Image: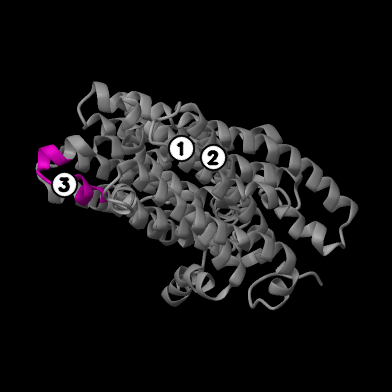
Amino acid sequence: ECGDRIGFRWPLWKKWYYLCVVFLVQLSMNLNTTLYSNGIEGISLEYGISPFALRWGGAGAFLITYSFGCELWAPWSEEFGRKIILQSSLFLVNCFAVLVVTSPNLAGHVIGRILGGLSTAGGSVTLAMITDMFEPDDPMFQHATSFIVFSSVFGSIIGPIIGGFVEELLPWRWCVWIQVIFGVFVQLLHFLAVPETRASVIMDRVAKEYRKSGENRYLFGPSENRRIDWVDVGRIWMRPFRMFMTEPIVVAFSLLSGFSDALIFMMVQSFGFVYWQYGFSPIQVGLCFIPIGIGYMFAYAIFFVFIIRNVSLRSKRPQDEYAQYESRLTPLLWMAPLLPIGLLVFAFTAAYFTTPIHWLPSMIGSFLIGIANFAIYMATIDYVLRAYGPFAASATGGNGWARDFLAGVLTPYAIPMLILTNYRYEKLSVFMATIVLVVIATVLCGAVFLVYKYGPWLRHHSKFAQTLA
């Protein structure tokens, strides 16, 4: 009875048209996390608060509450549909952003940021829309996932690139007004252009139409008579955190992905401190994020080719467990180590030598970090989606929560870490702080090789993971 109204039956061009709109929605959500940071100096002067405290109350608090907001919104999108939940989320985020920019006091400003983060649905809903339109075995499923992952990571660096111009040329409030303007635009675009994608919600609506027209008074949708079970909702809310604590694959990949993402947010806070030696203006500091964006594009192109080859491998070897699961991690075996390598390049070129060398080599380090960050997010999400089947949403929820939570916790400490690692010598402090990050990245990247080798055993001994029959 639903005909072509179910997402799986839409033509491919229509699916990608909707994904392009979702791309902009996700871009808007992640823009909110970083553009704010370019206004910190102006905000701290206006409200009489230290920049460090504001990095906690404005930047870090938004990311921390964002991490929980993603998990809180997800179950409701299953129950009431993706569209109304995304619309509600975007509306609230825009409203609280207006509170941030118009509040006459610091308390209202910080409350607006906290509630804005909590109101952000994020990837928990946008990634779920892919499952509404593509079957798991559809070759386009991985391409769609890669596309939305790209929007997420790219949105985080658009903020400082735009923010450099805003910081230098405009009052700090424009760092928030731009968020509001873009947020309202994508909300209207999503409202007008994207229909409901959740199959059960569409079926409920079709059943109501049949009863109303009199064609079939006894036709009911799968969710019409189901009431909200708060116990069940609580269980669903807690499942991502439970899996984060008990599933080795989830915890290993979540910590790696979270740390990788946190590095980008630490760069947002610390690049001005690092590049002061070159006399960079805020605009020039913002442009330093372009190499990271180029790294994202390069990694996206590599995954585009890899996915085509991986789909071919899986079709040729449908009963091969490696082909169906661990082969998805193959590009990560050489791209994940680029994270500590990129940090090492950055440490030696930006801060090791007493006399500054040219800034270009440090950008190569940023480029390598960008490649690694995209690859880690994409490959871990792709593997977890396949490995955990019906529990994949909770497993990826743990990944998303770790990315935002660790970013929020580490963001305020970016500059203090650079200074306090060696307080006598500013250049050496940057070098030593980055070496600490290199060591952590190296340890976490080891998880990729362990899961690649022992993944079958871990999945077969998991309470949640799907295994081959």
- Residue lying at 81% horizontally and 57% vertically, measured from the top left: 323
Secondary-structure class at tag 3: loop
Q: Residue 155, labelled with which disc?
A: 1
Is residue 374 depicted above or below 60 in this figure? above
Q: Secondary structure at mark 1?
A: helix
Q: Nearer the viewer, residue 248 or 150?
A: 248
Could you tell me how many numbered marks the image carries?
3
Query: Disc 3 designates what residue?
Result: 50
x and y, in percent, of residue 300 in the image:
63, 37
Locate the C terminus and report the quarter of the image it occupies. Answer: bottom right
Work out whether mark 3 precedes mark 2 in sequence or the reverse, and give the earlier one: 3
Residue 245 image point, x, y percent: 50, 74
Q: Which of marks 1 and 2 precedes in the sequence?
A: 1
Q: In the displayed structure, would residue 396 be above or below residue 270?
A: below
> Distance of mark 2 from mark 1, alpha carbons?
13 Å
Residue under numbered circle 2: 370
Give the magenta range.
Answer: 44-55
